[in-house]
Image (cartoon, rainbow, N blue to C red):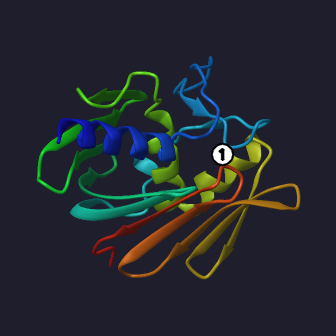
Amino acid sequence: MQRFTIFTASFLILILTSSCASKPAEAKSGLFVNLTNKSKFFLLAPHDIEKPMDMAQQISASYKKYNLSIISWVAADETKIEMSAFNEMGTTMGELLFREGIIDLKSSVIPKVFKPEYIVADYQLCFYKTLPLRLALEKSGLTLMINENNRRIYEKNKLIIEILKNDNSVTLINHLRGYTFAITGDFE
């Protein structure tokens, strides 16, 4: 069972961090991710969240032939993003905290080589306000297009990330890196 838990945690982090690894740069928060091989997306401050949430979420992810499902508790507001991940048995797999430009990931099953910045970046792409997100993406050479609740991120004319949102689910499709995840919760 421990082997399954380690595999599940490692796979989740692999999916959410499959972009190129990076080291902090000299910027406001100092934290960035490479959404493409040529872009540096600097993480936004927590105050740019669309609306606070404190809820359980079901996360289903797929990468190539692998699929997994976990339960996560997310508490996010203008001061922080806090996530706790659980396996199907209810065992804690890890906890992540993003506050004041600092990310802390605690887990005995998630290898240290995986960067929590990518989890925060994907979360911000899904749940942060349009204007600061658009400005941050433009600084990294990318374009954000909005159609109703759906978001599309382009590098020049190439669609790299697509985010489909409705009242109870958010699906992120990373066309460039080849992974998809769907988050189900009460987002109203």
Write down the quadrant of residue 134 in the picture. bottom right
How many other residues sit within 10 Å of disc 1, few (<14), some (14-19) or many (≥20)? some
Q: Secondary structure at mark 1?
A: helix
Residue 26 vs 151, above or below: the answer is above
**Horizontal arrangement in the rendering, residue 77 relative to residue 115 (left or right):** left
Where is residue 181 drawn, in percent x and y?
47, 61
Kindly give the residue lying farthest to the right in the view shown: 157
Where is residue 179 drawn, in percent x and y?
57, 55
Residue occupying image coordinates x 38% and y 29%: 103
Where is residue 170 drawn, in percent x and y?
45, 70
Residue occupying image coordinates x 55% and y 78%: 149
Q: Amino acid at mark 1?
A: Ala
- Pick the residue in front: 65 or 169: 65
Where is residue 43 drawn, in percent x and y?
54, 38
**Which residue in the structure is indicated by mark 1?**
136
- Pick the residue in front: 136 or 182: 182
- Pick the residue in front: 132 or 187: 187
Residue 130 visible in the picture: yes
